[in-house]
Structures are given as structure tokens and as C-alpha cells.
Amino acid sequence: QEHLVESGGGLVQPGGSLRLSCAVSGFTLDDYAVGWLRQAPGKEREGLVCITSTATDGRTFYADSVKGRFTISRDSAKSTAFLQMNMLKPEDTAVYYCATGAKCFGEVVGGANWGQGTRVTVSS
């Protein structure tokens, strides 16, 4: 059974950093595109970043809102994907989700499998 679990969220001050993790089980992470998305209160879900499968060279696509601040990576041996978030802003406050799927549509993963989300709050 395919399963994704996010962790690493929390409260951070503006300008701070967090690293989110997405541990997967039941499938091989390298075989899929992996994306991170977020949903802020009262807003639609927003695609942030997507990395293609290892077979397609692991290309990355970032939304303008996070380009230069967020970095996606994947540790195949640990079956875990990461989202390093730097220079966080109050507007980054949201529930963050990882998802896997067949391909990236720009920064949005064509996701078939989702985690439960992890909450990030950026506030002083």
C-alpha cells in the first residue's frame, strides 16, 4: 500500500528556515515525480515545486513565489523527499503537502498519492 507521511512543520520566525520531510513507503520514490504543495487558510491549494523521476533526470520546476528560497531534494536510500525552506515569510504560512505522480506539469505534480500535510506557521 502506497503511503506518504510529511513531517517537519512548526512555528518559525520570519526570515527563518525549516526542512520538511516526506517519507514514502509501498513504492520506489525514484520512479515517480514528487511535488510539494500548500494550502493557506481561505485559499486554493498552490503548487510550489516538482521534481521529475530519476529516469527523467530529476529536473526541478519552481513556482515564482518560492524560487530562490525553497529547494526540493530526494534521498532514494531513505525513500524520503525534502523541502528546504529558507527566508520564510508570513505569507508562507500554510499546510504543506507532498504528493507523487507520473510527471510534473511545471511546478505542479500530477499527483495520485498525497500525504496528510504538515502545518507551517511563520510569525514573530
Image: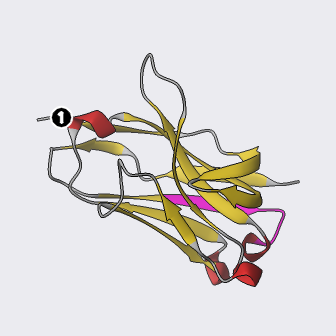
Q: Is residue 1 magenta?
A: no
Residue in the foreground of this view, choosing between 76 and 40:
40
Residue 15 versus residue 92 in the image, above or below: below
Say which quadrant the N terminus sits in: bottom right
Q: How many marks?
A: 1
User: In the image, 89: left or right of 39?
Assistant: left
User: In the image, 40: left or right of 104?
Assistant: left
Q: Which residues are magenta?
A: 21-28
Q: Residue at x 42, y 53 (%)?
A: 8
User: In the image, 113: left or right of 43?
Assistant: right
Prevailing secondary structure of the magenta residues: strand
Residue 2 versus residue 29 in the image, above or below: above
What residue sits right under mark 1 in the picture?
123
Q: Residue at x 25, y 57 (%)?
A: 17
Most distant residue in the left direction: 124
Q: Which amino acid does the dot numbered 1 rest on?
A: Ser
Residue in the foreground of this view, choosing between 122 and 108:
108
Q: Quadrant of residue 114?
A: top right
SS type, badge 1: loop
Q: Residue at x 55, y 40 (%)?
A: 117
Say which quadrant the C terminus sits in: top left
- Residue 115: image location, x then y, percent: 65, 45
- Residue 57: image location, x then y, percent: 66, 83
Q: Is residue 25 magenta?
A: yes
Q: Few, some or many C-alpha atoms within 10 Å of disc 1 (few <14, some 14-19, many ≥20)?
A: some
Q: How is the image coloured?
A: secondary structure
